[in-house]
Amino acid sequence: MTANKPIYHFQVGDRIEITSVELQDVMRRRLLDLGFVPGTVIEVVQKSPLGDPLAFKVFNTTIALRKEESSLIYGKKVYKEVV
Amino acid sequence: MAHTIALAGNPNTGKSTLFNLLTGLKQHTGNWPGKTVLRAEGELKTEKHVYTVIDLPGTYSLYSNSADEEVARDYIIFEKPDITLVVVDATSLERNLNIALQVLEMTDRAILCVNLIDEARKKGIHIDKEPLSKQLGIPVILISAREKIGIIQLLKTIDQMTEGKIETQPFKIKYNQTVEKKIKQLEPQIKQIIGNALPARWVALRILDGDIKLLDSLKSYLQNPDFVAEKHQPAQGGCCHGA
Amino acid sequence: MAHEANQHMQQLDTLFKKYSAQEDDLRDHIVSSIYQSTQSITKDSVHRSGKKTTWLDENLDNILTSRLYGFPIMLMLLGVVIYLTIVGANYPGIAITKLFAIVEDWITTVFQWANAPHWLYGILVEGFYRGTSWVVSVMLPPMAIFFPMFALLENFGYLPRVAFNLDRIFKKSGAHGKQSLTMAMGFGCNAAAVMSSRIIESPRERMIAILTNNFVPCNGRWPLLILLAGLFMAAGFSGGMSTFVSASVVVGIVLFGIIMTVFVSWALSKTLLRGVPSHYTLELPPYRKPKIWNTIVRATLDKSWFVLKRAVIIAAPASVITWILANIFVGEQSVLQHFVGFLDPFAQMIGLDGFILMAFILGFPANEIVLPILLMGYLATGSMIEVDNLNDLKQIFLDHGWTWLTALNMMLFSLLHYPCGTTMLNIWKETKSAKWTFAAFAIPTTIAIVVTFIIAQVARGFGLV
C-alpha cells in the first residue's frame, strides 16, 4: 500500500483514490459536490504552464484546483480505471 | 397563464443551446462555465400549449450555497415550475445525474434530457433509455440540441406531462439508518409548520445538512410566498448571455 | 397572519438548532449517498465500448496548456486573430465608405431640391448622417471579422484554457482566476463584462474584476487602435510587412492592457481591497468542434446589429451635438473651439491636443464615436468630410501636427481611460456604491494621464519627436 499524501503532490497521469478531504464549510461542500468524495478515483491530467493549478479528471469532468485546495485533499495512488 | 418550464443542469451540458433552440432566442453560447449569469426567460409554443421557459444557472449541485445555486434551488422549490427539465451530458452521466437526483428530491414533475447524445455515440458510449427511465421514475429523452435530435419527442413529452398524462415515481435516495430515522422524526414537525406546500422530506434533509441559507429562504417564503419572483428579476436582453 | 408567520419562523429555528448536523460526517454521508445512487443507476444504463475519449480531448490539452507551448500559442492566436482582422477589414471598409458617399450625394440632391435651410442640412447630413456612417464604416468591418473568430475559439472551449494558463498570475495579484473569463468578455463589451463578473463569487475579487475590466479594449476601441496603428506605426513599411507591424503594435497594446490589469489588481488587493484570494475551482470543458458556419453567421449578424444599434442610438445624437457646438459662435470662435482651446495646454502635456481630449470627453457615452468626433472637430466647419481613402485621413491628422507620439498616446489613452457611459452605469448597478463607481472612473483615468504624460515627456526629452 502506498501512503496517503495531498493530491497536489502526484504527477500527471497518476490515478488517485481519494481518502479524505480536509477542507471545511462551503469549499468542502463544493469539492464534494464536484465529486472529490472519499473512495472516488481521480486522475491528474494537466499542470498549468506556471506549475499551478493542477487539473484533475473527476467523474469524466476536468476540474482545475489551486494548490491551496489540492494540498488539503488526500489520496493514495491506485492502478485502476477512472470512472 | 402560460405553463412554466425550468431548465436545470450542470454547466457545459448544452443547456443554453437547448434553451435557445426552444425559445428561438438568437444568443450564441460559448463553451465555458458560468455563461448564464442571470436567469434568462423565453417563450415556447408547442402545438397545444404555450410555455415560459426559464434557463437557470448551470450548477454542479443545488446544495453548495453559491449565488447561482441559490437562484436555481429557490426557483425550483418556491416558484414550483410546472415542469423541470434536467439537462445532462450524455458523455458524463455519472456526474450529471447528481443534480438530477437532487431535483427529484424537490419535485416529481421532471423530465431528464440526456443531451449531446451524438457526441456520446462518437465516444462509444451507449445509453439505455428504458432502464434509466424506470430507475429514475421519470421520462428520459435522448437529445442533441446542436443537431436538433429528439426535440419533437421532447416537446411531445412536455405536452403530455402538462396534460397530466404521465405518472412519475421519482427515485428517492436511500440514506443510512441514522439519517432516515431523523428524517422520520422531522417530517411531521415540518408539515405542521409549513404545510404541504413544500416537500417535507427535502426540507428535513436540508435541515439535517445544516443549510442555513435555506433557512433564510424558508423564512422569506413564510412571510411572502412570492419572494423569489420579486428577488430575482430575469435578465433583460442578451447582454449577459454571450460575448 | 403575521403573528402566525413569526411563530412558524421561530419553530423552524428551533428545528434547525436541534437537528442540524454540526459534524462533517453526516453531511458527507448525504453527498456520497447521492453519488453512490448515481453510480448504481448508471451501471445498468450506460455502456461504454471502445475508446472513452476522442483524440482531441486526450492530446490537445497537452499542447495548449503545456509548459513549453501554452504561452506562445496564446500569444500567437491573439496575433493571428488581430492580423486577419486588419487584413480583412480593409476591403469591406473601403467599399462601405464609397457606398455611404454615394447615398450622401442622393440625400444632398434631395435637400437641394427641397430648398432645405442650411442649418437643417448641416445637422441632418453633416452631423447625423456622416457621424453615423463613419461609425458604421470604421467599426463594422473589423468587428464583423474579429468576433466570429473569437466566437469560434470560445465555442471550441479555448477560453477556460487561457484562464487555466494564466491562473497563477491572477492568484499572485490577489485576483480570481475567472477574471480572465470576464476579461475575455471585455474584448466584446466592457459593459457586458462588468455584468458577467457575477461568475466570481467572492465580493472582493469581483470588485477587482469590475474595476480593472476597462483595461481590455472593447468593441468600440478596437477600430481606433487598428486604424492608428496602421496609419502611424507601420508607416515605414509596405505591403504584408506593414500589416504585420500594425498587428504587432495592436498586440503590444493589448498586452500592455493585460499587464496593467494584473498590476492594478495587485495594487488594489494590497490596498483598498486587501485580502487573500478565495477558493476556486475551474472546469475545463471538453473541446467541441463548433458549428463553424453557424457560429460565423450568428456572430457576424449579432455584432453587426450591435454596432448599428450603437451607431444610431448613441453615435447619431453625439454627432448632432458636436455639429451644433461647432456651429454656434461666441465671438470669433465656435463653442467647440473655445472648449478645445481650454483643453489644449493640458492635452499637450500628455502628448495629445485639445481636439483629441475633447473627443474623448464628448465620446463618454460610447468609445465608438471618439474618432468621428475628433474628425468633425478637426474640420473647421464642424462636419466631417467624406474620406474615402486612408491617406486623406492621415493627411488630416498630419495637418494638425500629429506625430507617432500623438498616435501612440491616443491609443494608450483610449486603452487606459475611464469606462464608457454604459459601463459606468452597469458598474453602479452592480456595486450599488458611489464610491466604487467613482473609483472605476478615477483609477483608469489617473493611470491614462500618468502613462501618457511620462511617455510624452520622455519622448520629447530625448528629442525623439
Image (cartoon, coloured by chain):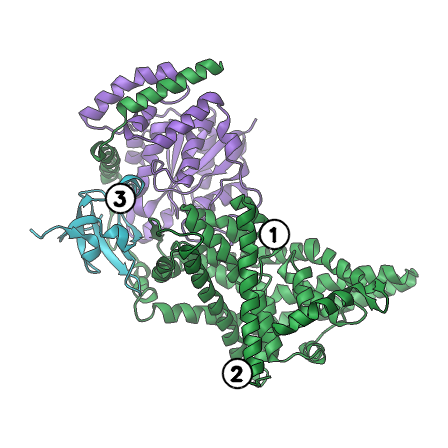
Whole-percent x, y for residue C358 in the image: 69, 65
Chain letter of the residue beneath label 2 in the structure image: C
Whether pointer 1 and pointer 3 mark residues with C-beta atoms closer than 8 Å, the reply is: no
Q: Position of residue B194 (x, y in %)?
A: 40, 18
Q: Amino acid at mark 3?
A: Gly
Q: Chain of mark 3?
A: A
Amino acid type indicated by mark 1: Thr
Q: Residue drawn at (25%, 58%), measured in percent from left and top?
A: A45
The chain drawn in green is C
> Is any atom of residue A80 visible in this view?
no
Q: Which chain is cyan?
A: A
Q: Residue at (54%, 74%) from the top-left corner?
A: C454
Q: Which residue is mark 1?
A: C422
Q: Compute the Cα span from label 1 to label 2.
A: 37 Å
Residue C136, how many percent across, how many down?
67, 63
Q: Please tell me the colour of chain B.
A: purple
Report the front residue among C289 and C6: C6
* Whole-number angstrom distance, CA of label 2 to CA of label 3: 52 Å
B4 up-or-down from C42: above or below = above
Q: In front of the other: label 1 or label 2?
A: 1
Q: Nearer the viewer, mark 1 or mark 3?
A: 1
Q: Quadrant of residue C442?
A: bottom right
Amino acid found under the numbered disc labelled 2: Met
Q: Which residue is mark 3?
A: A35
